[in-house]
Amino acid sequence: MLSTVIKYSEEKHYCPHCSGDLTLCHAPQVHVGDGLGWGSEYLFICLNDTCPLFVKGWDYIANQYGHVGSYRYMEIPGSKETYTMMVAGKDAFTGSIVDIEALKKQNERYMTQKKALAALDTAVEEKNLEPVLTIILDESAKVEDRKRAIEMLPQINDLSCLDPLRNHSFRDEHLAMEVNLALKKVLEANFVKECPYCSELVKLQAKICKHCSKEL
Ligand SMILES: [Zn+2]
Ligand SMILES: [Zn+2]
């Protein structure tokens, strides 16, 4: 879970060989057939290239096994397990460092979505457009939730929904169509239409746009 990895990222772990900070990394993919997963999606690893364990490891492995490699110190998050792990090269884990800022943003989006979903239940009676827009504009929200929110637009009947929805490009064409239909209802209920030239709102009966002076 995201909250777990965010908690891990706030923990401080130190390498007993070099006293440097351990780096939170994604655990490497292990072939299912090997049956030797780490039991954790994440690992704390000493990525310090001047760590004595890593520096001395090259000679040790060359002498013992006759191939190129060294060792990195590693701990399994949420446990007391520590390992000395063989690595084939310097960059073995640099590509799997956990991007905690990206994860935090993802978590924030998730929390905003969750809050908005809960607020949908009372959005119509409270004329609360905000959670409705949040869900409709959230491309990662479930289609059925977004459809439900779109249906609320005519019921809330608030013209301020127009700009954010018109400015959004929907990946799902069907949703875009449903949004258009809902907006049409909102416009009609407010006796206004959008000027086809400047997109500003004008009265339904207007013959000339008061914003761009074009004939309608
Ligand atoms: Zn170290
Ligand atoms: Zn106009």
Image: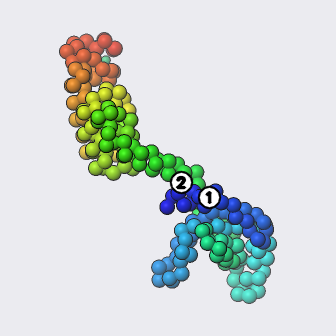
The residue where tag 2 is placed is 103
The answer to whether residue 23 of the structure is visible from this angle is yes
Ligand 2, by image quadrant, is top left
Q: Quadrant of residue 24?
A: bottom right
Q: In this rendering, would 32 be left or right of 80?
A: left
Where does the image place residue 117, in percent across and percent down from the top left? 36, 46
Amino acid at circle 2? Leu
Disc 2: CA contacts within 10 A as few (<14), some (14-19) or many (>=20): some
Q: Quadrant of residue 214?
A: top left
Residue drawn at x 22%, y 12% is 207
Circle 2 sits in a helix, a strand or a loop, which is it? helix
Q: Is residue 50 left or right of residue 163?
A: right
Q: Is residue 142 above or below residue 181?
A: below
Mark 1 belongs to which amino acid?
Ser
Residue drawn at point x = 64 percent, y = 76 percent: 81
Relative to the observer, which residue lies in front, 72 or 158?
158
Q: Residue at x 64, y 67 (%)?
A: 44
Give the image's coloring scheme: rainbow
On residue 9, which mark appears?
1
Counting the numbered discs, the total is 2
Sequence-first tag of 2 and 1: 1
Residue 87 visible within the image = no
Q: Secondary structure at mark 1?
A: helix
Q: Are marks 2 and 1 in contact (CB under 8 Å)?
A: yes
Q: Is residue 179 above or below residue 186?
A: below
Image coords of residue 146 (percent x, y): 31, 45
Q: Position of residue 159 (x, y in %)?
A: 31, 26
- Left or right side of 32 for 160: left
User: How busy is the neighbourhood of tag 1: few (under 14 within 10 Å), some, or many (20 plus)?
Assistant: some
Asked whether mark 2 lies closer than 8 Å to ligand 1, one says no
Relative placement, left or right, of 106 versus 161 is right
